[in-house]
Amino acid sequence: MTGLPDAGTLDALVIGASDPDDRAAWDALVKLPGGAEAWADAVARRRRMDILAGAVCGRPWLASCMLRLSALSRRIRTRTAVELLLDFPDAPLDALARATLGPFDESFADQAIQPRWGQIVTVGLRIGERVALRVVPDPPFVDVRYLSDGTDGSLPSRTWRLEPGEAPVLIVALLGTVAGSSLSDALEHATATAGVLLLEARPR
């Protein structure tokens, strides 16, 4: 092997599903520059997949919406200068300074907190804490919706306070939608989407 293992091979190594004779991939990770980083990325990717799988298990309404968001993101190639940021008004200062999700909960420790167009990021919130989606610059045409327990609606404040039994909650930012339409209809017309999946983090 002349380079680092590809993503598929790395995923197989992480879950122990690789060929026992595939020594070349392990050797490359140990010997080649960037091997440690590639391994860490693969482990973090696997953790994200496990977290998402746990969230959608038994919740077809969430799985269906996330599949639609993923399909839409693959189809849309619109570039936008609008940036999305997350604010945590009730979080400890060290959580903001370290820019990690769930610093008190290892299951969220490797998650990047900045949402990006075309992606869904996972946020761990404790009961009573808020998360706010900030748009930079702040144009009026960014439509923010929520999906909770199969019910969707508009979220003009772009802020959600997590209450007992609510998680998971999916916050969706959209461009190119019609105000007042359902989330399903909005996804038919959106030219760009980004998602924030809110999960309940363990109390400190």
Image (cartoon, rainbow, N blue to C red):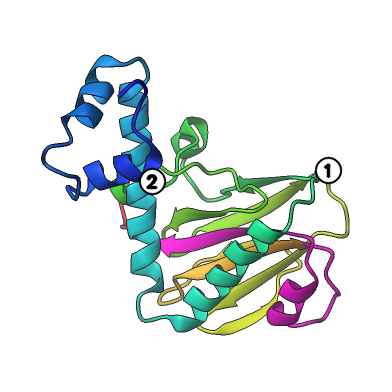
Q: Say if the magenta span includes residue 199.
A: yes
Residue type marked 2? Arg
Give the quadrant of residue 141.
bottom right
- Residue drawn where x is 55% and y is 58% of the image: 130
Residue beneath label 1, please? 137
Q: Is residue 75 visible?
A: yes
Q: Quadrant of the N terminus?
A: top left
Residue 97 higher or lower than 109, as above or below:
above
Alpha carbons under labels 1 and 2: distance apart? 30 Å
Q: Nearer the viewer, residue 66 or 169?
A: 66
The part of the chain drawn in magenta is 175-200
Answer with mark 1 or mark 2, whichever residue precedes in sequence.
Answer: 2
Residue type marked 1? Pro
Q: Position of residue 136 (x, y in %)?
A: 78, 43
Residue 160 higher or lower than 135, as above or below:
below
Please state if 43 lies on the left or on the right of 157 as rendered: left
Q: Say if the magenta span includes residue 148.
A: no
Q: Are marks 1 and 2 in contact (CB under 8 Å)?
A: no
Decide: few, some or many residues near mark 1? Use Cα within 10 Å; few <14, some 14-19, many ≥20: few
Q: Nearer the viewer, residue 31 or 133?
A: 31
Point out which mark residue 45 bears.
2
